[in-house]
Structures are given as structure tokens and as C-alpha cells.
Image (cartoon, rainbow, N blue to C red):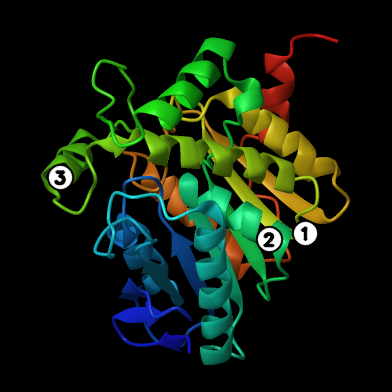
Amino acid sequence: MPELAESYAQMEDGYRLPLSRWEADGNTHAVVLSLHGLNDYSFAFDNLGQYLALHGITVIAYDQRGFGNTDGVGVWHGSERLSADLVTMTALLRERYATVPLYLLGESMGGAVVLTSLASAPLDVDGIVLVAPAVWARSSMPFYQRAALWIAAHTIPDTQLTGEGLNLQPSDNKVMLRALGRDDLVIKSTRVDVLYGISNLMDNAMLASNIVPGNILLLYGKNDDIIPALPTCELVERLSHNGTTRLSAVIYEQGYHMLTRDLQAGLVLEDIATWILEQEKPVIPGSDMRSYCASLNGPE
């Protein structure tokens, strides 16, 4: 029987997901259920949670299976299982906060879980925030990269990779990145089969964007070198024309992948709070992601 406790949520199979909470100051105007990215855990939303709590928005996040303080950490538990957990968590929170608007927020891998879940089951939520969603589908990867991943996943699945030497910069907030490096709950090396699993998830998330319904705010940083711009623009295009989504898409000129923790995070957090609290103004002032995507394709 699913259960929502103070420090954990128990799923129908008895598996426990540790919770982090940031309760709204005063009256609760909205609740945001947040899903973290690959190798991270619920504390990733401490910055977001503290900010939104000051604006009357309660934030609840959980460690997804295989991450943080969960059992079987470092192992891929399957895209379907991650989505099923989100469906259960959403139902538990809707029951707990029956009269309060409920939103989902997915960062990177969490965004992919949100998209696939929306496509597979109706979720009783008032809106979705996608922060640099992981949608680098294999169709947009070079052939050699797809082939190498498949071979590795089927021959050396438990081999662990660290990403050293790739010269990727997930954020310009070096103090925050150093703190993550010292955090024992942040996974530092990833099994090949986990990478294969996240690739399947990203494929499914892109396909799901053709049919997902709802009110969606999508945020992306121009300096994001974790999830490339072209697949993100493909996602924007699909969401803009699927006939079931009302989309606001914003690009941040100084933003990186970890938008809510970058040095310019204050701007991002303000935009999220404004969008949640002022739904009659669904478009955030600033750079429109669609215009940026059009510029990537060059002149007609």
C-alpha cells in the first residue's frame, strides 16, 4: 500500500523513497514535486526549495530509485519503474494537498521521467516545469556514439565511467560544483548499463513529447553542453505543435545545465515562482527559445 510519511514515501512494492521538504512560509499557494537529474538526489533542490518556500510554495523532492539514499544505489531500476514511482507520488500528494495547485518539476533526467510519465498515464497536476530536460535521443547522436554505447551495455554493463577528460562544464558555480564533489550521496562514476538505460529514457521522452498534454514551462541555458541545443529545440518544436500543450520556452544567455544552481540562478528561480503564481501570464518575459532555435537553423 503506498504511503506518504514525513521523511519517505513507500511505493506499492514496499520500496522507500527518501524525501526532502521545504515547507511554504505562511499559507501554501502551490506544491511542487521535484525530480532530480542523473547521479544526483533530492538535495539538488535546496536552492530552489528555500526560494519558493519564501514565496508560499512548498517543494517536495525524493531520491529516485538507484540514487541518493535509496536501496540499490548506482543500479538502473528501469524507466518504467521511475515513471511508476512518479505516478504514485503524484497521487499521494494530490490526496494530501487536495485543494492546492500541484506542479511537477523535472531537472535533466527528472524532466525525461516527467515527460514519459505524462505520456503513459493521466497525472492530476496543474503544470509542468522542465529544467534542461534530458532529451538527447539516440537519433540525434553520432552513429559511432550509439554503436559504442550499445556494444558496451551488452558486453561490459557493470563497467563504471567517470566522465573525466570530456571537458564538460555543467555550471559556472564552481563553489557549488566543489560541494557536489564532496557529497557522498552524489554518484561520481556511472555504470555503462545505467548510461544505456538513460539513453532509452531520453528516446522515450522525445517520443512522448508528441502527445503529452498540459501547461509547460521549459527552461534551457545557452551554455548547456550536457544536453545539446538541437535535440532541445526538437523538443520545443514537438511540444509547440502537438495540439495538447501550452508551452512557454525560455533560454538564458548566461545559463548552463544546472540552471537553478548557476551563478544567475536567482533569475531562473524568480521566473519559476512567477510562472507558478501568475498563471494568467504564462509567458515569461525574456528570450524566447523558439527564436533561438530558428537562428540555429539559419535563414529560410
Q: Which residue is mark 2?
A: 118
Q: Residue furthest right?
A: 243
Q: Residues within 10 Å of mark 1 (few under 14, many from 20)?
A: many
Q: Secondary structure at mark 1?
A: loop
- Residue 82 visible, this orientation: yes
Disc 3 marks which amino acid? Ala
Disc 2 marks which amino acid? Leu
Q: Residues within 10 Å of mark 2 (few under 14, many from 20)?
A: many
**In-front residue for pair 220/270:** 220
Of mark 3 and mark 1, the one earlier in the sequence is 3
**In-front residue for pair 48/91:** 91
Label 1 with label 2: CB-CB less than 8 Å: yes
Q: Position of residue 37 (x, y in %)?
A: 41, 48
Q: Position of residue 12 (x, y in %)?
A: 48, 81
Tell me the residue at 79%/45% (across/down).
210
Q: Position of residue 224 (x, y in %)?
A: 46, 28
Of mark 1 and mark 2, the one earlier in the sequence is 2
Q: How many marks?
A: 3
Tell me the residue at 47%/86% (across/down).
2
Whole-angstrom CA distance, mark 3 to mark 2, is: 33 Å
Q: Secondary structure at mark 3?
A: helix
- Residue 271 visible, this orientation: no
Q: Which residue is mark 3?
A: 179
